[in-house]
Image: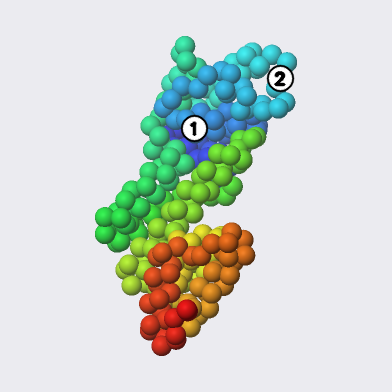
Amino acid sequence: MVPVYYRVLGTTAALRPDGSAVPLGGARLRALLTVLAVRAGRSVSATVLAGEVWGTDPPAEPQAALQALVGRLRRALGPGAIVSGPAGYRLDVPPDAVDLHRFGRLGDEGRAALDAGEPARAAALLNEALALWAEPPLADLPDAEAEARHWGERLRAARTARWAAALDLGEAERALPPLTALCRAHPLDEPLHLLRLRALRDTGRPAEALAAYATLARTLADRFGTDPGPALRALHTELLGASGAPAPA
């Protein structure tokens, strides 16, 4: 059976319709499939493929080595999985057949739903997206640092939106622990800190929220000589009013 779904989040895998995995063999074969899956449905030139599969350690005859590797991958995946043409080689599946692209689409749709004032729909879409994630992304690509960093930012955006949806749904107690962990991991991310302060406010912890704001304000001043952004300052003013504490001069 020809594979119908590909994973490149974590270890690269090709899955048949019955859910079983296609044996893929060595690291180079998985690297080749990863490059093609990241560009699912688009042709990739032989030069780009060879560069990404072998990186700084190319074979003596890259074109011949690539042709041999493509032949092995075709035998593993079955006829028709990889299409060749003047522009190069193409994994002949829609992007949604690759977990990375499905994650990206669901994350984008979830954030759009949140912006449209549909937090329940946003939460469902973002849950589906986050369930696809596995570490490390693009594990079988030799030089994936820049691409992995890009997708790591997409992951952070999806998590941020997921817990924003939770707050909009009145689930502050549930959102607070993961937001605290995310703020610890990303101490300069103001949107995350804003969500955490909202969660502290909504769970009846205004004093903790004020202390967290003060810590963030000191960090930003020390690192960049700046103040928190307008949304954080507005929430800070609200928290001061609720606590009865005097506003700073």
Q: Name the residue that disc number 2 marks.
A: 59
- Is residue 185 shown to the viewer in this render? no
In this picture, is 245 found above or below 75?
A: below
Amino acid marked by disc 2: Pro
> Of residues 247 and 175, which is closer to you in this image?
247
> Of residues 200 and 229, which is closer to you in this image?
229
Labels 2 & 1 near each other (Cβ < 8 A): no
In this picture, is 167 found above or below 140?
A: below
Q: Quadrant of the N terminus?
A: top left
Q: Residue at x 43, y 25 (%)?
A: 42
In this picture, is 9 found above or below 42?
A: below
> Of residues 56 and 241, which is closer to you in this image?
241
Amino acid marked by disc 1: Ala
| x and y percentages locating residue 48 in the rendered image | 57, 22
Q: Residue at x 39, y 38 (%)?
A: 96
Q: Residue at x 40, y 58 (%)?
A: 161
Residue furthest to the bottom: 244
Badge 1 element: helix
Badge 2 element: loop
Q: Label 2: few (<14), some or many (≥20) within 10 Å?
A: few
| x and y percentages locating residue 29 in the rendered image | 61, 29
Labels 2 and 1: the sequence-earlier one: 1
Quarter residue 17 falls in: top left
Q: How many marks?
A: 2
Q: Label 1: few (<14), some or many (≥20) within 10 Å?
A: many
| x and y percentages locating residue 109 in the rendered image | 33, 48
Q: Name the residue that disc number 1 marks.
A: 37
Residue furthest to the front: 249
